[in-house]
Amino acid sequence: MRDESYGTTFDATLTEGGAVGGADLGIDLRGDIDGRAEAALQKAYAQAAMRDPRRLLLDFAAVDYINSTGIALIVGLLARARKERREVMARGLARITARSSRSLAWLTS
Amino acid sequence: MFVTCLYAVLDPTSGRMRYANAGHDVPYAWSTAGPVELRARGMPLGLMPGMTYEEKETTLAPGQNVVLYSDGLVEAHNPQRAMFGFPRLKDLVGTHPGGGELIELLLRELDSFTGPNWEQEDDVTLVILQRQGGTVEGVSSAVNGAAAGERLLADFTVRSQPGNERLAMQQVADAVGELSLPPARLERLKTAVAEATMNAIEHGNENRAELPVAIRVTASEERVAVQVTDRGGERAIPENPETPDLEAKLAGLQKPRGWGLYVIKNMVDEMHVSSDSTHHTVELVLRLADRGEGAA
């Protein structure tokens, strides 16, 4: 049995997103979006929500990997944003879909 | 009124099949000695009260076929009122390697036998059961623990800790490297392996690190198969997962999760689920004949 466990790195940081697509605020996602990304993702969204943006940009350009739990986290975030009447945009998905999963392409198609 | 019935319980992991027969036409199994009848004694259901039924058992080897059929085939008549009959069926079965093509052959033969003006006399139902891959204890043709015609490329376990699906994914990718899968096909297999392993860790083994998830990779000329086995036992895995309703999830009417099996099923050509009292196995199959990029 492989004895090690696979480490992960994920962080989500707020950026001023006005330059892209008219977003008021952006969240840069970096690393692996799996179950272990939940706390950092929730925290970043909560910080963004405190500034009450109408348009929020999620930037996936630096995401290396996403799995079905990660998809669920993003869907949960989108559901919360919809409830709060925020528009959410995404960029940088092409790299992920080419490298590790087409799942997000389905979500955004 | 009475009905005939063949009742069989198949364990896809071991190939073990137990069966009883209430007056139904006897299935044929392939063997090196030709087709053999899988007989079990029993009267049709509803004919007499208090009947008991003999239970028999066989074990299907990887690649072995069984043909099940209704009497509309063997009792069909030609214009001269001769019956299609069991000997003709047995001969046809004996000259064919099996698989779904046998159904087409039998229907063509039936059509040829009965002629163009035949009025169908009864229902004609044909089922070919073919065991794929896997291992059978005691099968002498097994090579390196893989089924006949298959090579074992990897056989390893990972601990049930979150994130270890990535280890599994990478080891499988390394193992299938020699097959030179097109990059997009390889990525799809990797995604499916990671998802299946994650399910095994979280749901089957409930994140209990000491429980292993066993992963086994085999390849033949036709396909590459990855079996992911956990200790989940009797908790069922749906083989045909529902398509997630994204709109309902976004509207908060459904929980955001529930993507794993759907993703797996869309990444590979075949997904098979089997269980026994202590294990679940999800088998992921990519067919090698289709080496193209495949549809999304």
Image (cartoon, coloured by chain):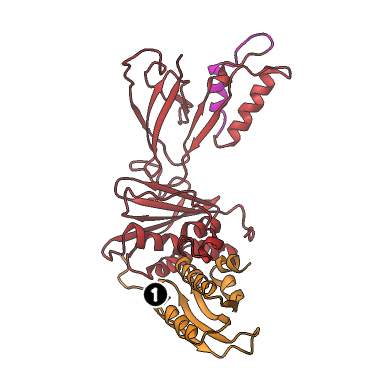
A108 with respect to B190 (left or right): right
Q: Which chain is painted in red?
A: B
Q: Which chain is painted in orange?
A: A
Q: Position of residue A89 (x, y in %)?
A: 60, 77
Q: Position of residue B175 (x, y in %)?
A: 46, 63
Whether residue B86 appears in magenta in the rendering, the answer is yes
Which residue appears farthest toward the top when viewing the image?
B80
Amino acid of disc 1: Arg
Name the residue located 63 percent from the left edge and 13 percent from the top edge: B77
Q: Can I make out residue B270 in this image?
A: yes
Q: Nearer the viewer, residue B173 or B116?
A: B116
Give the residues in magenta.
Answer: B79-97
Dot 1 crowding, Cα within 10 Å, few <14, some 14–19, many 20+: some
Which residue appears farthest toward the left when viewing the image?
B210
Q: Secondary structure at mark 1?
A: helix
The image quadrant where one finds the N terminus of chain A is bottom left
Chain designation of label 1: A
Name the residue located 29 percent from the left edge and 49 percent from the top edge: B278
Residue position marked by numbered label 1 in the rendering = A36
Which corner quadrant of the image does residue A88 belong to?
Answer: bottom right
